Each structure stands twice: as C-alpha cells, then as structure tokens.
Amino acid sequence: MTIRALHVASELYPLLKTGGLADVAGALPPALSERGADVRVLLPGFPAVLAGLTDLRPVAQLGRRFDAPNVTLEQGTLAANGLVVYVIRADTLYDRPGNPYLDSQHVPYGDNAQRFALLGWVAAQLAQHLDPAWAPQIVHAHDWHAGLAPAYLRAAEREHGRVFARSVFTVHNLAYQGIFPAHLFGQLGLPADFFHIQGIEFYGQLSFLKAGLFYSDRITTVSPTYAREIQTLAQGGGLDGLLRFRTHDLSGILNGVDYTVWNPATDALLPEHYTATRPVGKHACKAALQKRFGLAEKSDALLFGVVSRLTEQKGLDLLLASLPEIIKRGGQLVVFGTGDPALETGLQRVAHSHPESVAVELGFDESLAHAIIAGSDVVAVPSRFEPCGLTQLYALAYGSLPLVHRVGGLADTVVDASLENLADNLATGFVFERFEPEALSAAIRRAFALYGRRTEWKATQKRAMQQDFGWGASADRYLALYRDLT
Ligand code: ADP
Ligand code: GLC
C-alpha cells in the first residue's frame, strides 16, 4: 500500500534556504517518493517559494485566518523533480523578502506566532480533506515552525472522535523553540486545556517546539547521538524531561547527502571536476579559491574552510582562539557565512590583521559554498552542539577532510585520524573531544601532521570520498516509521 505523507516545513532547497533544514526538506521527500511513497510538501507562501514553483493553482479558499484576510491554499510543482508543493498564500503574513524569520534588523518578526500557527493549522486541515483530491495519512512536521501541526491534529481528533492522520515531528535544532507570550494562546483556536504543562505551555509561555514534541505520535531527530544528548539536563534545553518521558517514541535518523547537488564529479559550480580515483581537479579548485579570496597562492599551504551560519552554536569563537596554531604552521583559513553581527565583525577584524592567510566574507551564496567545500583541504565544523550537520558530509564527498567537535551528528559521521584509526583504514577526518582551545589545537596539529605524510593524506581523502551518506538508508528508516504508524 502506498503511504501518503505531507511534509510541513518553512524552507526548502532550491526555493528558499537559510540552513540545513532546507536541504533536508528538498531531498527527503523525493527520496521517499523514489521508494514508492506518495509525498507532498506544505510551505508558507514566501515570495521566493511562490516565484520558484510552476503550475500554481488554487486548491481552497480559507477566508480570514490569524488576522490575515483572504488566505488561500494553492498547489504548484517543483520543476526540477516534479514534487507537488502546497503553498499558503497570505500576503500580509508572508509577502516579505529576505530571511523568513527575521526582519532586516535581525529581529524576529512580531507576528511569527500567527505566521507559523497558520502553517500548522493548514497542515491539520489538509489531513481533514481540505484538498478533496489528496489527504495525507502521515503529517511530518519539521522544527518549531511546524510544531503546532500535531496539536491541531490532536484537537481535530478530539472534536470529531476519529484519527485523521498520524504525526511525526522532527527536531532539527532544539535551540530554536518558537517561544511566544501566553496571551497569544487565545488566538490559536486550540482547546483551552492545551495551555498546560502537559501541552503547549512552557514556563508560563507558549512553545511551538514543545507542542510538536508533546502532541506528535513519533519524534525523530537528525542523528542518533543528538537523540541521546537532548535527553540530558545539560543539552535538553529545558525539554529533557519531556524527551525522556517520550524516549520510546524518539529516534535519531541521520540526514543524508543529495549527491545530485553535492558531487565533485558533476558539480557545475566548480572550475574543474574530480573523483576519488582521479583527484587532480581538486588542485584547481584550491588555487581558484585562494585567488578568489586574495590569499597567498601557495599550493602546499594547508587550507581550512568554513561555510556556516555565524551563530554561537557553530563554535567559531573557539576556532579564532586556535587560529595562531594554523597561522604559525603556514596554514590558511577561509570563512564564509552570515549571522550574528558581533561574530561577523570579530571575524572580519581577524582577517584584516592576517590578509595573506585569513579571509572572511559575509553573505549567503550557494556557488561560493560549493567553491569553498571543494577548494579547502580541511573543512572545520567546531560546533558547540550539532544536531546533524551537513557541511561535514559535503566535505567528505569532496575529499576535504572534516575537522569536527565530537558532538551530535558530527560524532556519528567523522572518524578521527588517530594512529589506530589510520592503521585500520577507518580515518576520515579530525575529531576533538572537549570544547576547549587546547583540544581543537591538537586536532589542527593532527591535520598538519597528516598533511605532511602525503601518501596517508591521499588515502584518507580517498576514503572520505568513498563514504556513502546518500538518503537511501535514512529514507528507508522514515518509511519504516510511517508503516509502523499506519
Ligand atoms: P545548519 O542547518 O545548522 O546551518 P547544516 O550543516 O545542517 O547546519 O547545514 C548548513 C547548510 O547551509 C549547508 O547546505 C551549507 O552549505 C549552507 N550554508 C551555510 N552558510 C552558508 C552561506 N553563507 N552561503 C551558502 N550556503 C550556506
Ligand atoms: C539544523 C541543525 C543541523 C542539521 C540541520 C538539518 O539546522 O543545526 O545540525 O543538519 O538542521 O537537519
């Protein structure tokens, strides 16, 4: 029997992307479809989403909802792969350019509660046959933006005395909780008793994330290690109690790589192509990167690359503390990202004082991201915490050895180049244990040491490139979960 599943998310590559959530929302549904599931996606009608879909046509008129007049549900297609995407057109809520969550001052929009409550509400309506032509058996909600979907489903269940769809809630990042003042509860249209510690209430406020965790039938997160970490007091963000309570419904399913987008053998954004067995093209990618960023064009300088949101999570302050270790050994560093203004200026200041060996550029650009992942020798991901992390997986595919903190998905995907791992042909990168400059510096020294042993370096690169993190295995696990529920 074909399973019908609706994925509910706020961003989707290639339409709109601020981070890895978009990569997952863009790649997991097609991977599920390839395995025979009937999968559609629901997104808010942000300008980039509406502009990127073809064959848009109305499905239902919803009238006035969450203070937005004339809300309509439309349906379109993603030309690249034929994915069917439902979009909510509510111009007063969504017709804003740029970042989908923050205004131009980096401040969350004042009406985010209404903007994302509407997303969850429409998801639950789709399960109740809002589209007469198609209704999901599984509603799969991603992160806090879609956290109210399971709550609205539960409310509908109670009102009508029947189950419309089962729900899966995936936590991509527990640090973003969708917290809003309690006085907004009345506008959500949920049963009064849902404002409760056994419900959406969180220390006197509303938490959309908690709603997803509490009301969903199953919870997943994006790596096995992160699934364990978030059940601890230290890393549970105040929700570890609930997560431990739901431990039997909680599992970690590792994200995958879309190798149609991230493959150095075919990547149209690279100056030259290369493969694990014919790696020479990588030299041209490195040279082009050094030139692009105005670094000394030395082929033998060990080049560290970072492509990242610039937030506390990503641990770049630690990398700055260990930067002397890179510079004194003749290495180079390229950082490309955007985010927290304080981190942005801190990084730029460092680049100014080491123009030959450190380059920092602010912005968000897909082609530059590919150029850095391909042209670097090492891709650094020193995150304080990392639910899964995708850049280290892309780095593996491009033979750019990842240097990572042993947390979350980073711990699950990179094997340290210790002597014993090298001897057993297991090493794929550099892993440090404690989030301290000494530990990171030691990993940096390991990278230089291995770089000095060219034969072993090349063997490690080849092994990294041959790792298979395709979506297949993960999609199978999600399908098994859906089957279990239906
Ligand atoms: P997170 O979702 O926490 O940001 P991930 O590693 O899961 O971390 O995913 C990050 C995604 O965003 C990757 O596809 C990465 O290439 C991309 N990315 C991050 N920063 C930039 C940037 N400045 N420009 C382009 N892509 C970026
Ligand atoms: C989040 C996490 C990241 C993960 C991504 C996709 O943004 O920070 O670790 O890879 O979601 O699941």
Image (tube, grey):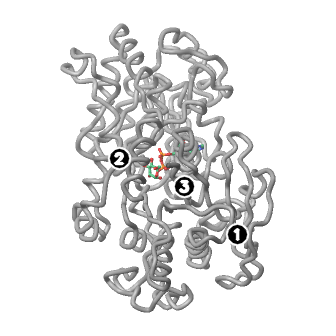
Viewed as shown, does residue 285 lie left or right of 346? Answer: right
Q: Residue 94 carries which label?
A: 1
Q: Which residue type carries mark 3?
A: Arg
Q: Say whether disc 2 or disc 1 marks the residue closer to the N-terminus.
A: 1
Viewed as shown, does residue 425 lie left or right of 391? Answer: left
Q: Between tags 3 and 2, which lies in front?
A: 3
Q: Which residue type carries mark 2?
A: Ser
Viewed as shown, does residue 268 lie left or right of 458? Answer: right
Measuring from the top left, give residue 113's x and y in whole percent.
56, 78
Measuring from the top left, give residue 123's x and y in whole percent.
57, 68
Q: Which residue type carries mark 1?
A: Tyr
Measuring from the top left, give residue 68's x and y in whole percent.
71, 81
Q: What element carries label 1?
A: helix
Q: Name the residue at 35% across, 7% down.
A: 455
Residue at the spot of label 2: 223
In three-dimensional space, the C-alpha distance between marks 3 and 2, rounded to whole angstroms, equals: 24 Å
